[in-house]
Amino acid sequence: MQLPQRKRTDTRMTDDLRHVPLCRCDEVEEGACRQVVLPGRKPLVVFRLDGAFHVLDDTCTHGNAFLSEGDVVDHQVFCPFHSGAFDIRTGEATVAPCVKPLRRYPAVVVDGVVHGDLSER
Amino acid sequence: MTDMSPIVVVGAGLAGVTLAGALRRGGCTRPILLVNREDRAPYDRPPLSKDVLTGARSIAETELHPDAFYADHDIRRLDGVSVVAIDAARRTLGLSTGEAVEWGDLVLATGASARDLPPGVVDPAVADRVLRLRDAADVERLRAACVTARSMVIVGAGFIGLEVAASARGLGLAVTVVEPAARPVARGAPPAISEWLCRLHRARGVDFAFGRLVDRVEPGETGTRVVLDDGSDLAADVVVVGIGATPNDTLARAAGLTCDDGIVVDADCRASHPAIWAIGDVARPLNAFFGHHRRLEHWEAARRTAETAAAALCGRPVPYSEVPWVWTDQYDVNLQFVGTFPADATVVTRGDPDGRAWCAFHLVDEGLVGAILVNSGGQRRSVERLIADAARPPLADLADPAVPLKRLIG
């Protein structure tokens, strides 16, 4: 089957916020990311680093930019607006002007699909 | 013996605060004193003309660090205090409080001041309606004025003028921008980008008066009457002047430091005195990228010169080399300028200039020298690297959005 070449995945919310399917693993290239838009909430971004998946808020905590349009270098993503950066593995702001950390969500892979735990805890 | 003399930093903008943090990160254990002219925690300036002016963010939300940062890093901050004199021979400073402080090294991060209209242009009766935008107090005054104002005249179509125009349109004000040059951002942008900016602003309802100087600002029927040099006039409840800035180098000159439109410093940001350094808008550093001294008056230069001086003070100098990079946010557009834009450059466009995201690459003798990135900032780091390497990428690859610029780095 031909895979869709979109960089964005629209997915349906399920009732269980602890286990929300976000995208297929093969939709995210190694060292890259994909924006995931869920109804009723700000977009998320799924990164793939060294084979592991990381789910974070996609909107920068500084400017009104999507990090999925930024630049992934090693374990950091640089915001496309002002080149502040976050550690993808922790969400921590690493380069000014970003100061506030990015929210991170626990991720698991089940049957080739990345799931995020989006529950408020 | 380890030098434990104090490092005193004058100015708590991005440059001063970045330097203090970088010193600690670099292992410096000397006392650090940060003299902050403003009576508030250090904040980031770029949001002032955008989110802070529109009210989307408060000044407190633009603070460079939480308050605990300074205590955690043993950085002593003196807020609301300015420096009145530098004694370079005795290595002391005179403060506005009347105190004198000793320094082992002195870092001048005094910034720049907004240029005013020439004397006599503004009628004193309306002086309180003629504002500028440089620091937090300025934006507080301007925000207060915008609450009741319905019309604004902006003098100067540089970045500050255009950002204020975008914010003021967002607040519902009628906006006219008066600019002596024939186009916006005439010094920094190629003509095609100026044209594009013009279209962007006109589509949002901004009027321009190009090639015009302001002769007088005098009382008008409601607010002010702005008289231009062709005799025409504009009514404005508030006037914003954004006609550039001049480096705050008065103290440095008085102290005998070499100055030439800013404090002249070497590639380590050291001034003509061995223990005095200058960073940020006030500094004119030797930039290895250009091979000569150049004062880059923008955010990234403030950050990088701070890192440069901190590295040298920590005993691990890395000569300053910066490909100029400046950004501006107007409406929903993030526009970035990387490198230089000579008039004779060949221009290669990637993407559709009528679309949301596109780039204009500038090449001289096939080498990439500059790039304008419209909503394409994710490319910035790759572009900067290509320019620093004087890369000669294939034009077809530059023009093709499907080719990641990263792949063109040798």
Image: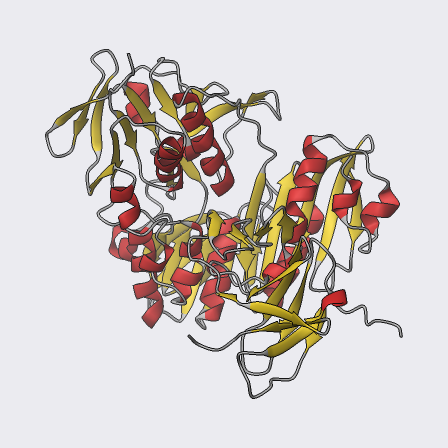
Residue nearer the viewer, B389 or B311: B311
Residue B406, by quadrant, is top right
Q: Is residue B265 left or right of residue A65?
A: left
* Residue at (46, 21) in percent of width and height: B316
Scheme by which the image is coloured: secondary structure
* Residue at (38, 44) in percent of width and height: B117
Residue B92, by quadrant, is top left
Where does the N terminus of chain B fall, quadrant-wise? top left
Q: Is residue B248 above or below residue B333?
A: above
* Residue at (64, 51) in percent of width and height: A72
Q: Is residue B328 left or right of residue B247?
A: right
Image coords of residue B228 (percent x, y)? 47, 52
Residue nearer the viewer, B48 or B303: B303
Where does the C terminus of chain B fall, quadrant-wise? top right
Image coords of residue B51 (percent x, y)? 43, 62
Which residue of the protein is positioned furthest toward the front in this rendering?
A: A111
Which residue of the protein is positioned furthest toward the bottom in this rendering?
A: A15
Q: Is residue B308 above or below residue B195?
A: above
Q: Is residue B69 left or right of residue A119?
A: left
Image coords of residue B35 (percent x, y)? 24, 35
Q: Is residue B161 above or below residue A25?
A: above
Image coords of residue B19 (percent x, y)? 38, 34
Q: Can the viewer see residue B393 in this picture? A: yes
Residue nearer the viewer, B386 or B169: B386
Q: How many marks?
A: 0
Residue nearer the viewer, B179 or A80: A80
Q: Can the viewer see residue B232 in this picture? A: no
